[in-house]
Amino acid sequence: MAMVMALSAENASVRLQAALAIGSDPRPAVLEALVERCAVEPDFFVRDMLSWALTRFAAESTLPLLRRELHSEHPQARSQALHTLSKIGDSSAWDRTAHRLLHDAHDEVARTAWRVAVALVPEDGKEDLADALVTQLGRGDSTVRRSLSRALVGLGDAAGPALRRAAAHSDPEVALHARATAMLRNHPEAGFDAAVEEAKRILALGPEGSAAAATAAAGAARPIGPAEPAGTPGESAPC
């Protein structure tokens, strides 16, 4: 039908309008095409509209298709399925996220999985999730590490024990990331970059620095410096 064909139009504005039209009048016949388009759509705004459109369909029809996409060989399909599941509020996605996609080899998929898991995990699963997330400390560039820190901070006190253990890790990158995250939990206004610099300073102090880091993880650390500039970009919705 015309709306399905418009989803693959060359012009992004046409694709955006097609997704809006489908979501405004959701019909089962186009659902499969909508899910498939999520895997290949290059435009962020169109992807976000596709996710919105999917939330307009009956969950019992949409969820099986999205869960199938979690096993796709295409990273964008996995990431976008997670993103849409979080918008729907499918708590069963927690199990699928926790056991596999938290460790996905593709950074963008893993970042999405961390965020979605924190949003959907039940209260009694937070410590287990923290234990799983700390296995990813030290991974990737500063953007990836910032995302992981935000996820751990989002778990609140449940992340404390796992971070304290990770702060003593033999890998210096893991230990640094763990200590910076612990500091960020107590002083979120300082920003990730400032927390990393403070963690480096404490590590350079030797044993005294270790004691200070333990105090920080317990919630009594001193302020860690000025906040990042107000214009520092945050995380956008995943792709």
Image: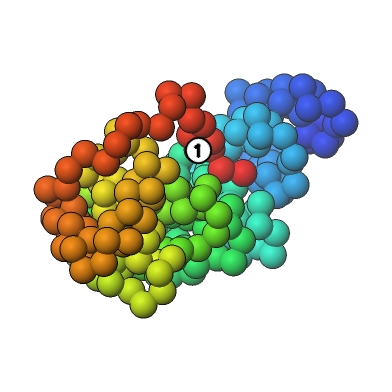
**Which is more toward the observer, 119 or 90?**
119
The residue sitting at the front extreme is 205
- Give the image quarter of residue 89: top left
Q: Which quadrant is the C terminus positioned in?
A: top right
Residue 161 position in % (x across, y down): 20, 65
**Colour convention of the picture:** rainbow
The structure residue drawn at horizontal position 78% and vertical position 34%, both measured from the top left corner, is: 7
- Give the image quarter of residue 162: bottom left
Q: Which quadrant is the N terminus positioned in?
A: top right
Left of 24 or right of it: where is 32?
right
The structure residue drawn at horizontal position 79% and vertical position 23%, both measured from the top left corner, is: 14
The structure residue drawn at horizontal position 55% and vertical position 59%, both measured from the top left corner, is: 140
Picture layout, residue 31 above or below residue 77: above
Residue 184 position in % (x across, y down): 29, 45
Residue denoted by label 1: 235
Label 1: few (<14), some or many (≥20) within 10 Å?
few
From where the camera sits, is residue 9 visible? yes
SS under mark 1 = loop
- Give the image quarter of residue 51: top right
**Which is more toward the observer, 73 or 127?**
127
Residue 107 position in % (x across, y down): 58, 57
Left of 48 or right of it: where is 217?
left
Could you tell me the amino acid type at mark 1? Answer: Glu
Residue 44 position in % (x across, y down): 66, 34
Picture layout, residue 231 above or below residue 75: above
From where the camera sits, is residue 62 visible? no
